[in-house]
Each structure stands twice: as C-alpha cells, then as structure tokens.
Image (cartoon, rainbow, N blue to C red):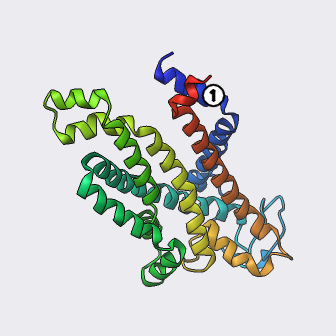
Amino acid sequence: MSERSGFWAELSRHRLALASVVVLGVLSAACLGAPLLAPYAFDAIDLSSIQQAPSEDHLMGTDDLGRDLFTRVLYGGRVSLLIGVLSAVLATVLGSAVGVVAGFYGRAVDNVLMRMTDVAYAIPTLPLLIVLASYTEATAVSMAVVVGLLSWMTTARVVRGEVLSLKEMAFVEAARSLGASSGRIIWRHLLPNALGPIVVGATLAVGNAIILESSLSFLGLGVQPPTPTWGNMLMDAQATMATKPWLTIFPGLAILLTVLAVNFIGDGLQDALDPSARSSR
C-alpha cells in the first residue's frame, strides 16, 4: 500500500474526523456566504424587536438592540475563523522555521533558539494578550498577528524533534554526499518529511486561536462592536444569560462546534500521518 493510499485509508477509519470535516465545512461555508444567507444587515437595529426569542422571523432571536442573532453569528464567524486561520498560519510558519533551523544546525544555534523558545513558553499568554490588546487597535488582522506571535513554541519544539531524527537518515546523508546545500536539504528533504506534525500542529492552532480571541472579546479587549465576533456576542449577553439564554447559546455553540471539529480533525490527521499507526493495522 502506498503512503498516500495508506493515509486516506487510515483517515477514513476516523469517523469523528470525517464528521468534523463536514461540520466545519458547512459552518465555514455558511459564514463565508453570510451576505447571501443572512436575512438582515449585521448592524441593523430594530428597537421594536428587542431581545425577542427565536421565531420564524428571527431564527436565533434578537439581541438587546433588536439585531438579528442568526445574522450576527454568521458574520461573527467570518471574523473569528479569519483570526483562527491567520494566526495558525503565522504560528506554524514561525514555529516551523525556528524548529527546522534549530534541529538542522544544532549546537550553538539550537541552544540559542531553544532558550528563546523556553523564555516564550514561560510568558503567560492570556495576560500578555490582554496587555497588548489594550495598547493596540483591535482589528481582526492585528489580533491574528498577536495571537500567532504568541503561539509558535509548540510547533517549534515538535519540528525540531522531527528534524533531529530525520537528519540522521540515509536519504539526508545521500543528499549531502551529492553536494546538496543546506538550504536544499531543508526545503527538499527535511520539511516535506516533517509535514505531518506541522499540519497537525497548524490544525490544532486554529482552535486555540479561536478560544483566545473569544476570551479577549469576552473581556471587551477584542474586535470592538458593532463588528460581531462570537466572543463579543457572549460579552454583550453576559448580563442576560439566565433570562435570555439564546443570546449565549448560539454563539457559544458555534465556538464549541468549531473547536471540537478542529480538534477531532487534528486527531484524525495525527493518526493518519503516523507511520507506526498505519503499519500496526
């Protein structure tokens, strides 16, 4: 069985991962298609429909300004997912670069980069995000950059460990003996073979970033209203959680489904990309 067919066969056995792909795909498509699916503008105020329960006119009810909650969940998902994906890409690129350089060159370079990683690990992420968010304009892009710059350390350590193992293998020694440069060995041999843990790390980073963004927005330090995110929708609804539960249930459910789906996909990819798991079956 080829590596590719083995990957798909293993992934197809992971029912939760496949179901999560469907759930995440539908949710993402709905959010991206918000201008077509949403029945109202996300900032359209209707003072005659304040805090209405879910109904035929408002599928998820309305908030304290009469804005349609279904519309705001869709548009809020666009912002939350954008922050999750952008920050995961940034964290993955930065972490992979640090990890592959540290693992390949070793010695002093490895020492310096790993000590930097340890220092970054020691910094409490959420308190630092709160401080940074209070001094910067909270846009989707700026939040994605801040979250990404504080989320690369795990990827760096995983990639470093993978590269330390790969660089001792025969195909790397063969490339060296043929005169391949360090850059070519890294790009053509090490990174492609370390793609498994990189992809899994990137997938899990999306869920982590969405949770961090939601936490900041819940504290009032994220993207500011009237632009909706799932986090600031929860912040707006915290005073009426007991009396108007739909205001928290729907954005909270969107966060829960997204993070669970991303984590299950990450688990499925980890199993499918692990050669030992495939060979044992």
Residue nearest the observer in this picture, 263 or 257: 263
Residue 39 in view of the camera: no
Q: Residue at x 60, y 49 (%)?
A: 262
What percent of the width, then of the height, locates residue 128?
48, 77
- Answer with the quarter of the image where residue 222 lies: bottom right
Relative horizontal placement of residue 166, taking residue 139 as reference (left or right): left
Q: Is residue 185 above or below residue 142?
A: above
Per the image, the residue denoted by label 1 is 12
Tell me residue 64's x, y (percent): 74, 78
Q: For mark 1, give the secondary structure.
A: helix
Q: Residue at x 60, y 68 (%)?
A: 214
Q: Residue at x 47, y 23 (%)?
A: 3
Mark 1 burial class by Cα count in 10 Å: few <14, some 14-19, many 20+:
some
| Amino acid at circle 1 | Ser
- On the image, the x and y values in percent for residue 200 come to 51, 44
Give whichever of 265, 218 is nearer the camera: 265
